[in-house]
Image (tube, rainbow, N blue to C red):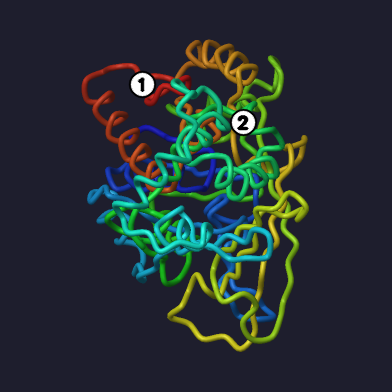
């Protein structure tokens, strides 16, 4: 049976390894870090016993029943609804923007129908075809709500004025004309009882899988394997020969306190004068547990430098141009498939990552059965 390498022990590499190992393939998983699960890594804090989302909050949500059934094989998922709050000018509001947000912000008692009519009067109808984040916000929520909940937060998160960002970024956050404050609209939502690292450990606990942590995968090592599934940064594979793709990274200021610090898992800080974007209180991600002490993360966003952990692909015009060159180089590689958030330079939620990894494994098996060449990309990274 063919020898497979999965570079990266996050969900992408773990799912591919798990699926192929169950079919008899010999798989070696490499990761440069000393732990499993990539940026989804979770671990107990020794001082508070709180389960910490080490690289920031991760809430699992999906409407894909196949993905939901697959992931539940590896741990029990506990019910969890992400109810984000936003602090602006010393007042707390509910996100996404919903009927409670609108009424509280404008001091009104609008019904769903009258709120929709009211919001129509706020939007700038002179903006017919919004091209930027700022245009999109002004067109649909108006100047006041834009400046309260989007402008400052976005500048801190992306390091760019909203007029420099594409309109597509804002489409992730809807306006609701009811009191639904569930941040996600997905059918299935929850958090694994034992953490995400536990899930990845279970995925990789197979006699056909060898895991090598603290081990960078060098390009020349590919010759030792029949196929490599690479979920590291695509520009790193080519030694940044065309230049570095742009990412935002995060810094966390960790604090431990007695009792309950903010009473909610996530609170966004929308004023530009506050240097951090949000505070997450990790014990609230596991409401089924009881803790006398608490741990919080103050989250700061900045441009990713060499040696930093890449979080969010920036994907502006210059980055997409650079990505195009790397994609062409990748298509000339033999027996390498670029996968995942870093390998395809796309922002991906966990459930999308898992669905794509399942698809990649299935396509590889079908390609082997039909003597076909596995492509460099299963999903077009330029879209």
- Asked if residue 370 lies left or right of residue 176, the reply is left
Residue marked by disc 1: 374
Q: Which mark is residue 9?
A: none
- Relative vertical location of residue 255 with respect to residue 176 in this rendering, above or below: below
Say which element carries label 2: loop
Name the side, left or right, on which 337 lies relative to 342.
left
Residue 317 falls in which quadrant of the image? top right
Q: How many marks?
A: 2
Which quadrant of the figure contains the N terminus?
A: top left
- Relative horizontal placement of residue 291, taking residue 98 as reference (left or right): right
Residue at the spot of label 2:
314
Task: Identify the image quadrant of residue 260.
Answer: bottom right
The residue nearer to you, when weighing 108 against 262, is 108
Residue drawn at point x = 51 percent, y = 86 percent: 290
- Occupied quadrant, residue 241: top right
Depth check, front residue: 159 or 100: 100
Q: In the structure shown, which secondary structural element does the residue marked by tag 1 occupy?
A: loop
Q: Residues within 10 Å of mark 2 (few under 14, many from 20)?
A: some
Label 1 Cα crowd, 10 Å radius (few <14 / some 14-19 / many 20+)? some
């Amino acid at each position: 049976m063919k020898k497979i390498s999965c570079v990266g022990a996050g969900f992408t590499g773990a799912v591919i390894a798990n699926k192929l190992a169950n079919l008899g393939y010999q798989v070696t998983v490499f990761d440069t870090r000393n732990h499993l699960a990539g940026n989804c890594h979770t671990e107990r804090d020794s001082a508070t016993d709180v389960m910490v989302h080490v690289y920031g909050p991760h809430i699992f949500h999906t409407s894909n029943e196949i993905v939901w059934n697959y992931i539940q094989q590896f741990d029990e998922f506990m019910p969890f609804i992400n109810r984000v709050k936003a602090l602006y000018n010393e007042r707390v509001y509910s996100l996404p923007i919903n009927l409670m947000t609108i009424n509280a912000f404008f001091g009104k008692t609008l019904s769903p129908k009258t709120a929709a009519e009211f919001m129509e009067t706020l939007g700038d109808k002179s903006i017919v075809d919004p091209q930027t984040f700022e245009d999109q916000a002004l067109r649909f929520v108006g100047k006041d709500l834009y400046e309260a909940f989007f402008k400052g937060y976005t500048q801190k998160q992306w390091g760019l004025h909203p007029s420099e960002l594409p309109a597509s970024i804002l489409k992730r956050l809807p306006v609701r004309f009811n009191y639904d404050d569930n941040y996600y609209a997905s059918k299935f939502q929850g958090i694994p009882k034992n953490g995400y690292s536990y899930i990845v450990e279970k995925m990789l606990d197979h006699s056909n899988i060898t895991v090598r942590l603290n081990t960078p995968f060098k390009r020349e090592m590919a010759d030792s394997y029949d196929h490599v599934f690479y979920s590291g940064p695509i520009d790193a594979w080519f030694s940044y020969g065309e230049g570095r793709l742009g990412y935002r990274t995060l810094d966390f200021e960790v604090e431990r306190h007695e009792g309950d610090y903010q009473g909610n898992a996530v609170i966004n800080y929308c004023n530009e004068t506050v240097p951090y974007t949000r505070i997450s209180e990790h014990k609230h991600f596991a409401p089924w547990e009881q803790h006398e002490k608490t741990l919080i993360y103050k989250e700061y966003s900045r441009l990713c430098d060499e040696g930093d952990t890449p979080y969010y692909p920036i994907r502006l015009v210059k980055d997409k141009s650079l990505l195009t060159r790397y994609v062409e180089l990748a298509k000339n590689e033999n027996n390498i498939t670029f996968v995942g958030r870093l390998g395809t330079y796309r922002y991906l939620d966990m459930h999308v990552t898992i669905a794509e990894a399942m698809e990649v494994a299935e396509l590889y098996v079908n390609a082997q059965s039909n003597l076909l060449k596995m492509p460099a990309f299963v999903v077009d990274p330029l879209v």
